[in-house]
Amino acid sequence: MLCHTRIVTLLLAALLALGGCSETAKLPVESGYGPTPALPAPNKTLLPTVHIAPARGWPPGAKPQAAPGLRVEAFATDLDHPRWLYVLPNGDVLVAESDAPPKQENQGLRGWIAKKLMARAGSGGPSANRITLLRDGDGDGVPEVRTTFLENLHSPFGMALIGDSFYVANTDALLRYPYEQGADRITAPAQKVVDLPAGPINHHWTKNVIASRDGSRLYVTSGSNSNVAENGMAAEVNRAAILEVDPQAGTLRVFASGLRNPNGLAWHPDTGDLWTTVNERDEIGSDLVPDYMTSVRDGGFYGWPYSYFGQHVDIRVKPQRPDLVQRAIVPDYALGAHTASLGLAFYEGRLLPSRYLHGAFVGQHGSWNRRPRSGYKVVFVPFRDGKPAGQTEDVLSGFVNAAGEAMGRPVGVAVDRHGALLVADDVGDVIWRVTPDDRRAAGALPR
């Protein structure tokens, strides 16, 4: 008789071999981009489509391909699953080295398979639970200082500085530390500001944070505890949402809801509107549902789990809420089905070509639920008058090799104080730095 582990291993192998093998995209991935993406009928299969690019890492000397007029070089290497980036006012670059926290409960066969799939994609290992500081004072792309800025965290992700208070969004709490300009390490104990949704399931574990322009509020992303509420709505309290935190009072409220898994947060430099990138739902076909970026309204509802991209009802969810579907806001701009769009940064620098000014860079971590694959690149969305205006452009590509293996997977993006684009790569364990290949020919703005 086969043991339980052997049975589950065979089931996993069957899922990888057969999962969605007859289900492929009918539309080009480009049709899932823009303000009015193609939204065909759902195509739910017996087994979900599983088409992962197995994590390999970069061979010596290899790197992503930059768009014409740009070049890319490694800014920092040999990191441990770098996920998110934050640039301090003095130019120091902070890197959250982090992975999912250990699961606190037995998730059964589905959970076991999910864990194995995560490992195949380059995640699910022990979390480094630290923030590393990189200091490149002269802007030559080589940090002179590399230190452990904070350690012994709990799956950290987002970071924010308000005055002399440095905030870290752990998976289960927003923490505050005292900060002195130029410090390369924090040793003072943390002060907990608020608890954040976590618990034994903690399906989407990452929590990002951004400060309001006046520093009076913090906004924290909180992903759903499921794909489409299969764990029940009681498990979704303060999830699939952006939370507004009063750091002085230590209170929070739901600022916007129905956002399945928001990650990136950024203020648009022209309008001052808050924008986010959101990962949409899985398992209804390779062409659905497009991830998206959108401006976020106070009190706005964006559909999850009852509908997607406005009023497109997801019949898998029971019971339905037609009252909520009726007021679901249509997102501003789709970013392709299953691209796992995470990182978000508006460009306000002077180094890159002027056409990037006030547009958005987006890190697309890459699909598992689409055949053929999507994402695995960094894209740029041009903006005009505070709104997306035009087609996306590839900025960094070539993260998947000819054998279908992921040499890297982009996550967080940020702009350093010199105007270069930084990209966290959590499979390659690299921070990439993008600069003009020839500043004069590229039409860079003068300093």
Image (cartoon, rainbow, N blue to C red):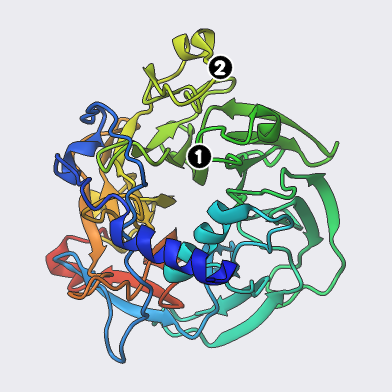
Position above or below: 78 against 362: below
- Asked if one can make out residue 424 in the rendered structure from this viewpoint, the answer is no
Secondary structure, mark 1, is loop
The residue that appears at 32% across and 39% down in the rendered structure is 45
Give the labeled residue for mark 2.
Answer: 319
> Looking at the rendering, which quadrant does residue 233 occupy?
top right
- Amino acid identity at mark 2: Pro
- Asked if one can make out residue 265 in the rendered structure from this viewpoint, the answer is yes
> Which mark is drawn over residue 97?
none
Q: Residues within 10 Å of mark 2 (few under 14, many from 20)?
A: few
Q: Measure the alpha-carbon separation of dots 2 and 1.
A: 15 Å
Q: Nearer the viewer, residue 294 or 186?
A: 294
- Amino acid identity at mark 1: Asn
Q: Residue furthest bottom?
A: 60
Give the labeled residue for mark 1.
Answer: 227
The residue that appears at 32% across and 49% down in the rendered structure is 49
Q: Residue furthest front?
A: 1
Q: Is residue 397 left or right of residue 139?
A: left
Position above or below: 267 against 320: below
- Quarter the C terminus occupies: bottom left
The residue that appears at 51% across and 36% down in the rendered structure is 260
